[in-house]
Amino acid sequence: MESLADLERIQTRILQQITNLELCLLPTGDTPLSAASTAVADVTTTEDRLSSILLRNGVRDFCFKRVASDYYDWPLEARRDVLGAASIHHLCKSIVLVNTQAPSNVTDCSDRNNSKYYVVVVQYTARFNAETVKNFLYTLNDGKIAKKKFNMRLAPEETSIKLTGFEHNGVTCVGMKTDIPVILDEAIAKLNPDFFWLGGGEIDLKLGMRTSEFIEFVKPFIVNCSGA
């Protein structure tokens, strides 16, 4: 059964890559697209919009998958199987953090080294450690900002929706309304094979992507910010 599942996963990825290449050959016009949300002509669905952004930014190995409405009630093993993921460790999520102790002049994401908000991508199988992000940001700023000015907490859901444009369980780093700096857990960068899954912009839409292409496109900070 495992060999059949592997074959199905490979076939799905090949078909998606063919589709991506076909899309890439379509006329795209002269308007460039960035990682931040950008208006795209003639795009009517989330999948189309995000696919267009990915393709225009050099990402080729990705695919989308619709899941059942009760997907989040399933064990990780069942989610792995329906997505065709390599393992449960390849299932990841994006969470929006807010620095609750940021200086009064830090109100947005204009300085990626000292942003009010960050999106952190972690595995479902890992335990996120906010303290390591705090220490990373303190070091990133060469200790010029007091460590007590970093206190990373989960942003309220309404704040997350306002910043990203995506609902809970649908958050992804692609096509966000706001260009929020991204922190990728180091464990994800080390996954083998290097293809992971995360939210796809809608609650029942998941996005799988080649990790190396994700890193090249998003240019996240890669931080050891979790434990098993």
Image (cartoon, rainbow, N blue to C red):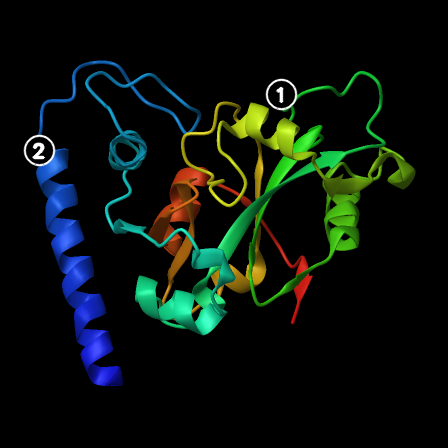
Residue linked to disc 2: 25
Identify whether 86 is placed above or below 197: below
Rendered-image quadrant of the N terminus: bottom left
The disc placed on residue 32 is none
Q: As drawn, is 138 to the left or to the right of 166?
A: right
Residue picked out by circle 1: 110
The amino acid pointed to by label 1 is Ser
CA distance separating discs 1 and 2: 34 Å
Q: Answer with the quarter of the image where residue 113 lies.
A: top right
The x and y percentages for residue 169 are: 51, 45
Q: Position of residue 209 (x, y in %)?
A: 34, 52
Residue drawn at point x = 46 percent, y = 61 percent: 91
Horizontal arrangement in the rendering, residue 172 relative to residue 82 (left or right): right
Q: Amino acid at mark 2?
A: Leu
Task: Tell me: residue 184, above or below residue 14.
Answer: above
Task: Give the residue displayed 57% in from the left and 23% down from the top.
Answer: 162
Residue at 73% from the left image edge and 57% from the top image edge = 129
Q: Residues within 10 Å of mark 2 (few under 14, many from 20)?
A: few
Residue 205 visible (yes or no): yes
Does any portion of residue 112 appear in the rendered image?
no
Is 190 or 108 nearer to us in this picture? 108
**Quarter location, residue 95:** top right
- 190 w.r.t. 122: above or below: below
Determine the secondary structure under disc 1.
loop
